[in-house]
Each structure stands twice: as C-alpha cells, then as structure tokens.
Amino acid sequence: EVAKSRRYADRRVALLVMTGFVAFMWVSNWMGSPEFLVESSPDEEVFQEILPQEGESILLEVPFDELEKGVFHPGEEFDDLPHLSEALHELGLAVYNHACTIPGNEIRANAALNLTECEESGEGGELVRYGNHFTDNAMPDPDITLTIEEMPGQPSMKVLILRAEVENPNDPDGPLLFENQRIGYRHELSGYDR
C-alpha cells in the first residue's frame, strides 16, 4: 500500500486505476466470448467440438473396449461399436458445419458427408476464403481422420489423434491450406464412460 492513509481522499488515484483495470478486463473478456463471434480456424473449431482441450468430450466418453486401433473417418458406422459410431457421427456433423466441397474437385476426401458447395470470397490479390451454409470460413474438401493407437508400453492407455489436411484447390501441388492435429489420451480407468 502506497497511500498515506486508508481514507478515500488519499487513495483516489489507486482506486481509479483499479476500477479502470477491472473495466478493461471485463470488456476484453467479453470481446473474446462466443457472444462476440470470435472464431478460430475451421479445423480447430471441429477439434474443439469433438476433442476439446478442457471439458466434456463425446470421443472420450466412448467405452475403452470400443476404442479399437485403426483409422476412422467422420460418419462411419459400425454395428459392433455403437458408441464409437455415435462419436464418428458427431464428428461428421462438426465437419459438415465447418467444411464445403468444390464441384469437380477430385480431392473429395470424406465424400460420404455430402458437403454443401463452397462459396468463394476474396477479390484480386486477396486470400481466397471459402464459406458454406454455416460459416464464412470453411475447409474445402477436407481430409479428416481419427486415429486410435495404443500407448507404447501402456496397454491401458489409448491415444486419440484427430488430423485435418486440406489441399489448396487452386494449387494442389503447393502447400496445404490447413494441416493440423489434436491429440487426446484415454485411460481404461479414467471413468469417462460412466
């Protein structure tokens, strides 16, 4: 405390600075909220819906016995793995909301999702953006996969890897538009499926 006394008259500057700081923090936190429509890249939006960094996850709720090793695609269904099929269905819905397709594009990854047609935006030298029915920042014909592996040396731990790769439709031989992955871990005794 640097004020001469605890009287208001001696602490006006400190209280004014504190009030200003609290107001600034309140406004900046509000600006980062979904109410202010702050969005991440479309691949991160999909990852956050299915395998969030914090909180509940439909993918982690899949019973440990259904997490078989392999590579899975959004929307796939398995009669003997109903919970994993439900999680893949939710992944398909998330991809559907954040992806689109370009007619005549031969990439056509995840063709079974029946993606809506891309709406291009951007003029001249600007970066071309793709949109769909849900967002103006969508992935054109993404290749989204879920890879389930066993943790080396720990048979009671599964590694869940969501991958997204999106080729540039205007330059298929050039760099990818999006290339990202998110890794999650699921232990047999974690209790997510209860």
Image (spheres, rainbow, N blue to C red):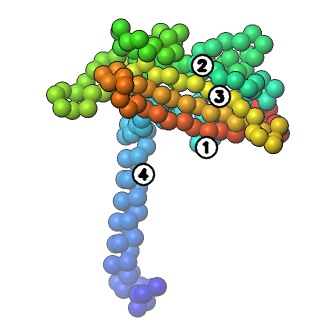
Q: Tag 1: residue type? A: Glu
Residue under circle 3?
147
Q: Secondary structure at mark 2?
A: loop
Q: Which mark is residue 29?
A: 4
Q: Secondary structure at mark 1?
A: loop
Q: CA distance from mark 3 to mark 1?
A: 20 Å
At x 36%, y 86%, the residue is: 10
Picture coordinates of residue 18 (x, y %)? Answer: 39, 70
Mark positioned earlier in the residue sequence (4 or 2): 4
Q: Residues within 10 Å of mark 3 (few under 14, many from 20)?
A: some
Q: CA distance from mark 2 to mark 3?
A: 9 Å
Q: Between tags 3 and 4, which lies in front?
A: 3
Kindly indicate whether the residue at mark 2 contacts the one at mark 1 (C-beta within 8 angstroms): no
Q: Between tags 4 and 2, which lies in front?
A: 2
Q: Residues within 10 Å of mark 4 (few under 14, many from 20)?
A: few
Do we see residue 50 in this rendering? yes
Q: CA distance from mark 1 to mark 4?
A: 18 Å
Picture coordinates of residue 52 (x, y %)? Answer: 58, 38
Q: Between tags 3 and 1, which lies in front?
A: 3
Mark positioned earlier in the residue sequence (3 or 1): 1
Q: Secondary structure at mark 4?
A: helix
Do we see residue 192 in this rendering? no
Mark positioned earlier in the residue sequence (2 or 3): 2
Picture coordinates of residue 194 (x, y %)? Answer: 79, 32
Residue under circle 2?
73
Q: Which mark is residue 54?
A: 1
Q: Secondary structure at mark 3?
A: strand
Observer-nearest of 47 and 30 = 47
